Image (cartoon, coloured by chain):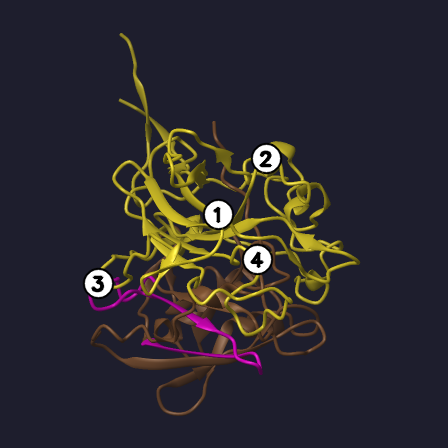
Amino acid sequence: MSETYRRVADEHTPFRDLVPNTQPDNNAPEYGSTHKRHPKQPGLRTPQTVTEIAGPRFSPSHYPAVIDLSRSGGHEAMGERIVVHGRVLDEDGRPVPDTMVEIWQANAAGRYNHPNDVHDAPLDPHFKGEGRVFTDAGGWYQFTTIKPGAYPWRNHFNAWRPNHIHYSLFGPGFATRLITQMYFPGDPLLALDPIFNTVADEHARARLIAKFDIEVTRPEWALGYRFDFVLRGRDTTIVQE
Amino acid sequence: MPIATSFQTIGPYWALIEHPEMADLTRFGAAGENVVLSGRMTDGDGAPVADAAIELWQASPAASETFPGWGRCACDRDGRFRFTTLKPGPLPGPGNAQQAPHVALTIFARGILTRLVTRAYFDGEPLNDADPILGLVEDPARRATLIARPDGPGAWRIDIRLQGESETVFMEF
Ligand SMILES: [Fe+2]
């Protein structure tokens, strides 16, 4: 008699643990702002309950999408127009559909549209730097923007952040929440950046760098980049059929 | 097998995605017992954390068209935050345990590379004593960092200390 087994997960199944070395340590001495902001006590390990396994849902009716950051008020922002697209998957390779992706970034000159940013670089009245997109049924997202500039940040002498776009994702549960940054290929500042290098694992770090994508590059219009996300997968159990 | 994408800090300029109305979880017309949950966030020097994002998530009452269950608030110059939401009810816990009413609070900020997650329970709730998560914190002084105190009618207060004396209990799961 043959026995078959099946991996089972549903919306009540907890999420898998994060993998050591693929996530930054909040105690990161090279990044000065961490010194007074990282907890000294070890985190309390807790089981995942409905609070951690369930999560908020967002719909474009309450949170309107903004898919083109390259224009504002009918005017074109300055800088190099780019298209960024990619896929949100879980650790089992399944698409994460209908999830909200928030985006924010500096303008082409490396200046944020934010009163605390005092970098001596021009603001662009036609670039706000905020976007919001939702993944489709296949987990795909896409937006148009301006390539952000590098900017100085005073962490150490001559410190410059590599070009980057900030991202916020939610996924299916509270445990899958993710905030991260997307970097650009070939940036010489990456090797020098204490924030990028807080990820110890080389392969995990490399996955924070977008890839140039000729397939979404639009002739006579904009270069394309691809950036995929992986959110925590469910901790499947194996049952006998 | 792919592995979950790495976190990076939210940084100092996340307010580009800030919308103050997100701190009011009742704004879509939710009906229930309104509560205000406010507090102040400080760092290892006791200085206000003026550029943090704090997010509130609660699985009870269940999210609906009129109640998102989720909100976000920017700490002000003095490190203060304030949410308006609905009072949560009890929730099932591991095994047959029941969880006392609580909300989860997530902190993102410059100088925090991932996220810090804590919970706010409500002082005086009879279920607090048997709550399976509170029960994991043996030191009563540390457990107290997870309990919001009454702060006037329908109002509760919880302060968050990122580091040092009276450091808030942060959870990993
Ligand atoms: Fe940035």
Is residue B171 left or right of A161 when viewed as pictured?
A: left
What is the distance, in whole Å, between disc 2 and disc 3 at their CAs?
39 Å
Q: Are marks 1 and 2 on the same chain?
A: yes
Q: Is residue B82 magenta?
A: yes
Chain in brown on the image: B
Looking at the rendered structure, the kind of residue marked 1 is: Glu
Q: Earlier in the sequence, mark 4 or mark 2?
A: 4
Q: Is residue B130 visible?
A: yes
Which disc is residue B64 wearing? 3
Q: Residue furthest top?
A: A1
What residue does disc 2 label? A206
| Residue A80 numbered mark, or none | 1
Relative image position of residue A178 (x, y in whole percent): 47, 50
Looking at the rendering, the stretch of residues picked out in magenta corresponds to B59-85
> Which of the two residues, B137 or A146, is positioned nearer the viewer here?
A146
Q: What SS does tag 1 mark?
A: loop
Which structural element holds mark 2? helix
Question: Identity of the amino acid at label 3?
Answer: Ser
Q: CA gap, disc 1 to disc 2? A: 24 Å
Q: Amino acid at mark 4?
A: Ala
